[in-house]
Image (cartoon, rainbow, N blue to C red):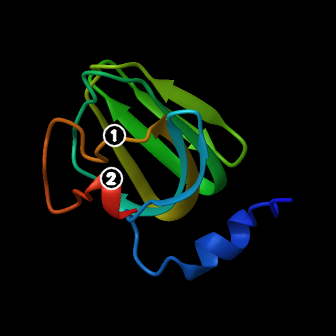
Amino acid sequence: MAEPVDLAAVLSQIEAPWKPQTVAVLNDYDLRVVKVHGEFSQHSHPETDEAFLVLRGSMTIRLDADDVALAAGQLHVVPRGVQHQPVSIESAEVLLIEPSATVNTGDSPSEFTIDPSRR
């Protein structure tokens, strides 16, 4: 029988922000944990929605229309094709839910881009 995933243990092993780690796969979706701090690059995912669930801390998702402020325990889904920029001034730990093939920087490669096959 499979063991449960200890999210706190996985997050404690992550040393740098913006480096998501896949903790489970659900059908064709990855559940990824990431530490966030500072500003991520602005991008969109033309083919998929992206879910952000804040586990600890707080963050803001900057959108063209408005900003979405999230505290621990809050969830927001960014619809496909919507430009967004995750930001956390004080840092946060976040669970991301997105298709396994999704590149973290979407349609805007940057210094934060991580090949999904390497997570």
- The x and y percentages for residue 67 are 41, 30
Residue at left 75%, top 66%? 6
Q: Nearer the viewer, residue 18 or 90?
A: 18
Does 91 appear above or below 81?
below
Q: Nearer the viewer, residue 82 or 24?
A: 24
Residue at left 71%, top 69%? 8
Amino acid type, mark 1: Thr
Contact (Cβ within 8 Å) of mark 2 with mark 1: yes
Q: Nearer the viewer, residue 111 or 22?
A: 22
For disc 1, the marked residue is: 102
For disc 2, the marked residue is: 116
Residue at left 45%, top 43%? 60
Neighbours of disc 2 within 10 Å: few (<14), some (14-19), many (20+):
some
Q: Secondary structure at mark 1?
A: loop
Residue 44 in the figure: left or right of residue 2: left
Residue at left 72%, top 43%? 73
Does 23 appear above or below 53?
below
- The x and y percentages for residue 3 are 82, 64
Q: Quadrant of residue 101?
A: top left
Q: Which mark is residue 15?
A: none
Neighbours of disc 1 within 10 Å: few (<14), some (14-19), many (20+):
some
Does 44 appear above or below 57?
above
Q: Secondary structure at mark 2?
A: helix
Residue 17 in the figure: left or right of residue 73: left
Q: Earlier in the sequence, mark 2 or mark 1?
A: 1
As measured in the structure, the alpha-carbon distance from the residue carrying label 2 to the one carrying label 1 is 7 Å
Res. 34 in view: yes
- The x and y percentages for residue 47 are 29, 21
Give the position of the C terminus as an image quadrant.
bottom left
Give the position of the N terminus as an image quadrant.
bottom right
Looking at the image, the residue that sits furthest to the front is 1
